[in-house]
Image (cartoon, rainbow, N blue to C red):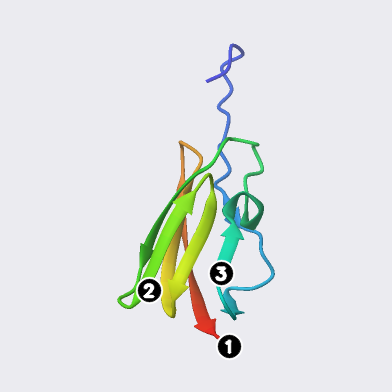
Amino acid sequence: MTPTGAFIANLPPRWDYPADEFSYDESFSLDLNSAFFDSDADPLSFSVSPSEGLTAGLYDGVLVILGEGQVVVTASDGHSVVSKTIRIVKK
């Protein structure tokens, strides 16, 4: 609650990227700080869960992928957690 007794609602982060399927030639990376948006301007933290056959890592909020498949990307603003499944294919 605020000093006035009013509750402040937290707005969860949201996927704010125009695509959820990506193709690449040599390597794939995506800045998750640009792909997710938090209306409250809370700092975001990320985690990833790749499907079998896909290697995924995070480096300072940048998702780096090797292979093909799906990865579940999770964003948290410290109050709410949201997940987005994205598909990665090689050209």
Quadrant of res 53 = bottom left
User: Which numbered tag is attached to residue 61?
Assistant: none
Look at the numbered disc 3 and give the secondary structure of its residue. Answer: strand
Quadrant of res 43 = top right
* Kind of residue sitting beneath label 1: Lys
Image side of residue 53 versus residue 57, left or right: left
* Kind of residue sitting beneath label 2: Leu
Q: CA distance from mark 2 to mark 3?
A: 12 Å
Point 64% across, 73% down: residue: 19
Point 59% across, 61% down: residue: 30
Q: CA distance from mark 3 to mark 1?
A: 11 Å
Q: Earlier in the sequence, mark 1 or mark 2?
A: 2
Residue at the extreme front of the image, as rendered: 26
Look at the numbered disc 1 and give the secondary structure of its residue. Answer: loop
* Kind of residue sitting beneath label 3: Phe
Point 54% across, 48% down: residue: 61
For disc 3, the marked residue is: 28
For disc 2, the marked residue is: 54
User: Which numbered tag is attached to residue 91?
Assistant: 1
